[in-house]
Each structure stands twice: as structure tokens, then as C-alpha cells.
Image (cartoon, rainbow, N blue to C red):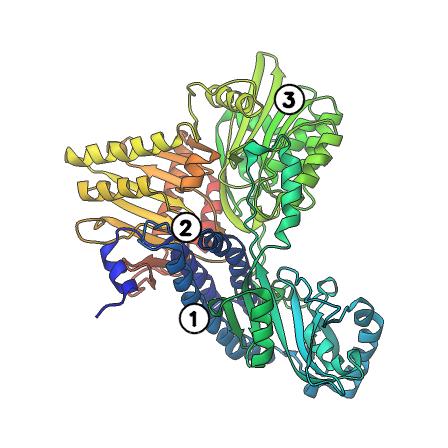
Amino acid sequence: MKNKHEQQKITTKFLNRELSWLEFNQRVLEESQCKDNPLFERLRFISIVSSNLDEFFMVRVGFLWEEVQAGFNKIDLSGLNEEEQLRMISIRIHKMISEQSNCYNYSLIPALKKENIVFLKENELTDLQKEFIERYYNDTIYPVLTPMVVDKSRPFPLIFNKSLNIALLLKVEGEKESLFAIVQVPSVLGRYLELPSYGYVRCFILMEDIIKIYLNEIFRGHSIQCKGYFRVTRNADIGFHEEDTEDLLEIIEESLKQRKWGAAIRLEIEKGMNNKLVSILKKELEIGEDGIYDISGPLDLTFLMKFSNLSECENLRYKSFKPRVPSEFELSSDIFEAIEKHDIIIHNPFESFEPVVRMVQQAAEDDKVLAIKQTLYRVSGNSSIIEALARASENGKQVTVLVEIKARFDEENNIHWAKRLEKAGCHVIYGLMGLKTHCKILLVVRKEQNGIKRYVHMATGNYNDITANLYTDIGLFTANTYFGADASALFNMISGYSKLNQLYKLDVAPLTLRHKFMSLINREIQNAKLGKKASIIAKFNSLVDKEIIEAFYEASNSGVEIDLIVRGICCLRPGVKGLSEKIRVRSIVGRFLEHSRIYYFYNAGEECIYLSSSDLMDRNLDRRIELFFPVEDTNNKKILKEILDTYLKDVVKARILNMDGTYKNINKKGKKQINSQEYLFELAKKKKEI
């Protein structure tokens, strides 16, 4: 007899959102297992698996946990309630963690050893290394340690979210009961220490392993019965009622404090930890068996991201590259002169993000510029754009910036930059009540010989010069009058001066984007019913929205050929007879995070291509301000079609979604071995030569 999970695979039209995301993380894990990737890049991928899981627990599992605690019993699209989802998530992640540990212990550590890079334990240390560690411990570690014992006068301490700790049971002379103690591994010192080497071998030791050596000294006078590492993940899905506050900034700052103290939803423990220690942690943290994860090897592999930057190891990383500046911007020192000639698209990171930064910097110094308006969702830690906006205001220009302070896990950073801009004299909007502003748009207003001229940049990704080298995104520069008028109308709506009436070119969520997208799908459906060729190709990050998925199903049954390139979550079930036979879904995980959103509609030969900041999720379409805009220049459309075609030809990094929610490799036999991201470097070079 089939179990419930197998039955729901067959009978429901939709895949579960959370399990689909976990399959994405599995594809990241596969990159850490792939021996074709350079060794240090494999370390990065396995680190990303851990950081992804941290966020997944803090947000998605935290949300489901809260729903269960509140007594809700809602059924999701896939037919599962919250408790069922949590149970299936736990089963899937336990399997993933086991696979991750095996990869680290039996593949990556031996591979590092072959490169003469080793992590040592106490019994492997030379006398010289022991002396080095002792000095470091006494001078640096010991002064910041705070051992905590639990007894009648000292209650169980509040364990910080994501902190690494050592739990101990201490035997006190003359006492029957053991004492429970905790030592937090101080994160301020970093996670590993490089030791004096022997020969050509570079030696390292983890910080927790150093502390473990000195536990007997720390608890002098007590005998240690058992000890083990543990780590707690807390619910960070901070919720608040925006309508109940008069000051959005104040409520966000207050909510950030709550994030540290959310309920414990995951307990990671060292494999083989003493059962009595585990029982104490379970009881004090109020965590169930499903929330406990035995880890074979180090807890929290996120430290490998920094470790992968180790000096003198360039041969263990991807070959460096220099993004190309499009020829239109290379040939002209005046960025506005270049944009005025024709619309220009830039494909990051294959092409440089520098023209975007230069646009703001030039606008800040240009006497003809009257105003700059921009939305900021996530920016880098040392943002050139922020500095240019501040300088523009100091130079007397009117600068309006919406800084989205509700961008999850970037709230604190964004509040900092918003206050910096305010001090410089910019008009800062701290997000809008009830909506996240996720669109990416920049407007520069210039007074020129023939009157006022507006220059616009819109993009699929953030104004972040760091992630622009790591994420694939596409931006459009234009001096088109209609785009300029729409941009002005949008900013007037954002700043609260007017309602957004009919726009010339843009569609904006939550006002018109959903309707626009549905109408584009319906047009393909009608063309297919008339016997015309009908096709949709879409590249984006997540597909969750029920109405859109149902429309894709209808389109498939009407004869529309649909190719979806979905990086992460996909709740659509492809290839099901009578439902989605003409829908193919693939995901690409590679060197760069796929982040661009491109939407193509055949339209009976009058092809339409759009770029957007929006994925096909309820939150994007209904609870965020997003942009959806057409690409009209013939050459730019040709470039975008070639980009989509490249992704569809990828047989190296692409995975195909099965109807049961799992992914499979593409059969490479007889096919040209195309790695889309590598090929796109060549495409960027070709574009430069046009």
C-alpha cells in the first residue's frame, strides 16, 4: 500500500513549496559533491547549503511552527497541513544533513589533505603547535570566554541564535547530582586558526577544538563526565502589524531585537552526544525529537565560505574574470549621451555593473541634473551608489530614495544607509506600510537644451555592486519618453503624492502586474486554439502562485509549448498527462546565482519580451511593489532570446524537474556540452563586438 506522501505525489496538481525549496538546496549540495568544480568552490557550495538551511529554519520552519502553536490546520496547495509539512521537512533535511556530512568528511577533507591543507585534532598536534595554541588561548581566547554553570542560583542561560556552544556535565565532589555547564564558542574570534606548518603542509584547527583542550582548566576542581558541541536555531520570522504603528522605522528596530530570542526550532548536536546532555537541552529548549539533528563532523559549515578565500590557493578556485563594459559605454565618457542614442541592456556579471554606478556618480556632479530618484532593496556594505546619492544632495540636487527597511536580514544595514542619506539631505522613504518595495528603478532628471529629459535604469536585481559580480541579472538603460513618464508617475505614487493611473509601458504590482501576466498567457492560449504556433519561455526564481500555475496548465492543454527555467521553488507539476504535458521545467545551479527574470511570449510571431523584478509568487504579485517592463529594441530582444536559448541548451548544470518533485540530470549523449554560464561569457564578448 502506498504511503500518504506517495499518494499525494500522484493525486495533487501542485508540489509542496517547502519540499521544492529543499530540492533546490539539494542541487546546491550536488555542486559541492561535483569533482569537476574547483575544490575551494566546492567548499563555498557546502557552506551555502548550511547558510541556506539556517535561513530556511529561521523563516519557513519558524512560520510553520508558529502556525502549529496557534492551532491552525490549514491545507496548502499540495494537500498538506502544517504538522505534515514539518514532519516531511524533518525527514528530508535529516537525509540532506547526512549527505552533507559525508561529503565534508569523506570527500572534501581528503581532497584538502591532497592539497596539503589539514584540520588537526588535539592528538595530531606537534609540540611547536601546542605551544602556539597555548599562547593564543591564554592571550586571546580565555579573556573572552564566559563559562556558565546551571544550578539553583543560576538558571539555564538564553542561548543566542546560531551560536556554537559546548555542553558539559560536571561531577562535583561530595554531590550526587551532576552540574550542567555551557561554554559559548566566541564568534568574534573567527572559527579557525592557522598553526605553524610542517614542511609544505598548511595546518588549521577549529576554535571549538582549542577550547575543548582547556575545558579541564576552565572548570578546575570539577571532573568532566561528558561534553559535546551544540547549536540552536531560533524562529526569526518577526511579525508585526504595520497598521498598528505610526512609525515604521521604530517598529522594525524593535522587531530586530526580538529576532535574537525567538523560540528554538532546531537543535544541532555533535554525533554521539551523551543522552543525558541531549535530554537536558531538549527540556530546557522545549524542542521535539524531529527538531534534533545529529551532525557527524563540525557543526555549522558556514565558516568554509571565509576559509575558501585562503591566500595562495588561486588554483583551487574558479579562474578570475573581468566583466566587460559594453562598448556603448566604453566609447562615450558621457553616460547620458550613450543612453540617449538607444536603449542598452547589461547582463551581469558577464558585463560590468560599473555603468550603473557611473550613472549615479555622473548625475551627482552634472550641473544639468535636477533630480535623482531611486529605490534600494539590498545594497553593499560600502556602497558607491549611497555615497554618490549623498554627494548629489550635498551638491544641491533633489534626491529621493526609497530604502526598503523590511528587506529580510538586511533591515539593520538598510536602516544605517537610510540614516546616512537623511543626514546628507536626501528625502528618504523608509518603505511603505503594508507593502515591500522590491522593484529596482533609477530615474535621473536633466535640464537640457530642448527641455527636461529623463533617463531611466530598471533591473531584475539589486543596486548592489558586490552581488552584481555573483548574481546573474539584467538591467535596461533608456531615455525613452514613455518610460520616463512612467518612472515619474511611479515615484510620485511611492512618495505619496498621487495615485498611479494608466501607465504607458510599465506594469506595477500589486496594481496591474497580475492582470498583465494573465492576459499574456491567455493571448497564447487563444492563438493556440486558433491553430497558431504558441510558446512561452520564462526564466525566474520561484513559481508558487496558484492562479498563474492554473493558467500554465490551461495553456498546456490548449497546445502552448512552455519552457520554464526556475532556479528555486516550483509548485507546478510538469509532464502530467492531461494536465501539463507541454510544460518543461529546468533549474540551473552554477558558479553564479541565477537571479534574472525574463519573460518571453511568441505572440503569433510578434514576439514580446519582458524583464521584471518579480517572481511568480503571491507575495510578489499581491504584497510587493514590483516592475514588469518590455524590451523593445530589436537588437536587445535578439540578445535576450539568445540568453534564453543558451539556458535551454545547457546540459552541464541544468537539472530537469520530474513530476514527483525530484530533479534529474540531462542525458548528455550526443548533445553539445554547453555550460550556460560559461557560454554567456562568450555571448557578452560577442555583444561587445556588435
Q: Earlier in the sequence, mark 3 or mark 2?
A: 2
The residue at the point 51 percent across, 55 percent down is 62
- The amino acid beneath tag 1 is Lys
For the question of whether residue 108 can be seen, the reply is: yes
Eye-nearest disc, 1 or 2:
2
Task: Name the foreground residue: 242 vs 29.
Answer: 242
Circle 2 packing at 10 Å, graded few (<14), some (14-19), many (20+), is few
Query: Is 448 positioned to the left or the right of 675 in the image?
Result: right
- Is label 3 in a helix, a strand or a loop? strand
Which residue, given by chain and number where applicable, does mark 2 sit on?
Answer: 72
Residue 397, quarter of picture: top right
**Marks 3/1: CA–CA distance:** 54 Å
Please give the label number shown on residue 371. Answer: 3
- The amino acid beneath tag 3 is Ala
Please, is residue 161 above or below residue 687 in the view? below
The residue at the point 58 percent across, 81 percent down is 274
**Circles 1 and 2: CB atoms closer than 8 Å:** no
Q: Earlier in the sequence, mark 3 or mark 1?
A: 1
Query: Is 12 positioned to the left or the right of 20 in the image?
Result: left
Q: Position of residue 343 (x, y in %)?
A: 48, 29
Which residue, given by chain and number where applicable, does mark 1 sit on?
Answer: 95
